Amino acid sequence: MKKAHPKIPSKPAKGRVARRAAIAKNPKIVSPKVAASNPASNRAERAAERRGAIIEAALDEFIARGFAATRLDDVAKGTIYLHFKDKEALFEELIRTAIVPLVSRLTAPPSVAGAPVRDMIEGFATAFIHDVVTTRRGDIVRLIVAEGPRFPEIADFYYREVVSRGLAGMRALIEIGVARGEIKQKNLARFPQILVAPAIVAVIWQSLFSRHAPLDANEMFRVHLDLIFGERRTT
């Protein structure tokens, strides 16, 4: 099942500078009447908006500089330390905001009761390709792959929040598929990594080789599922 989600567009360095300047100011003008009626609510709203702007600016900086070279002061000046104690905390929040909600779909109940397992997996794969592979979220995954060995704490966090949940969701779907007879290879549940491998290949391929050989990630995933479930019968 495919859901349309807005892409995170690529932004130039000037955009990063402008955004850092913008988040140093009050991002929302509240009328005196509204502010007087509920000042606590308005303060919370402004704090949430600033936090969101900081996370967006952090995405720019981490992608442009890498995790090792990025400093909190590169992201925003002023009160950023009231929101995040260090860049590790900021990077973790970026993962929670940009990646974790996508993986959470795996554990959500299917929209159609009794839907074929292949359809559920293909729907998730389509959404992942649309929301990660073809957007700047993919750069977060590539950053983990590139810098995770030097910074095991961020790799550990990504494993806990994203990888372990994704594998658990895939394993559960595989077990349902085996029980229904949709999947013949029962040992696949031991290695759910096999099922999601094309998604990782697509993320890496997009940044390294797409200019040489563009990859149709959706079609690659369909062929991969044909190998697991058997080719779809056409009527």
Image: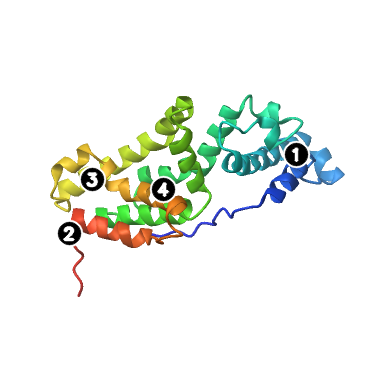
- Separation (CA) of disc 4 from disc 3: 25 Å
Q: Secondary structure at mark 1?
A: helix
Answer with mark 4 or mark 2, whichever residue precedes in sequence. Answer: 4
Q: Earlier in the sequence, mark 2 or mark 1?
A: 1
Question: Dot 4 corresponds to which residue?
Answer: 204
Cα distance in 3D space between marks 4 and 1: 42 Å
Q: Quadrant of residue 220?
A: bottom left
Q: Is residue 108 left or right of residue 231?
A: right
- Tell me: residue 225, above or below residue 20: below
Q: Circle 3 — which element?
A: helix
Marking on residue 230: 2
Marks 2 and 3 in Cβ contact (< 8 Å):
no
Q: CA distance from mark 2 to mark 3?
A: 14 Å
**Does the rendering let one see residue 114?**
no
Q: Secondary structure at mark 2?
A: loop
Query: What number is the disc on residue 174?
Result: 3
Residue 221, quarter of picture: bottom left
- Of tags 4 and 3, the one toward the viewer is 4
Residue at 50% over, 45% down: 139
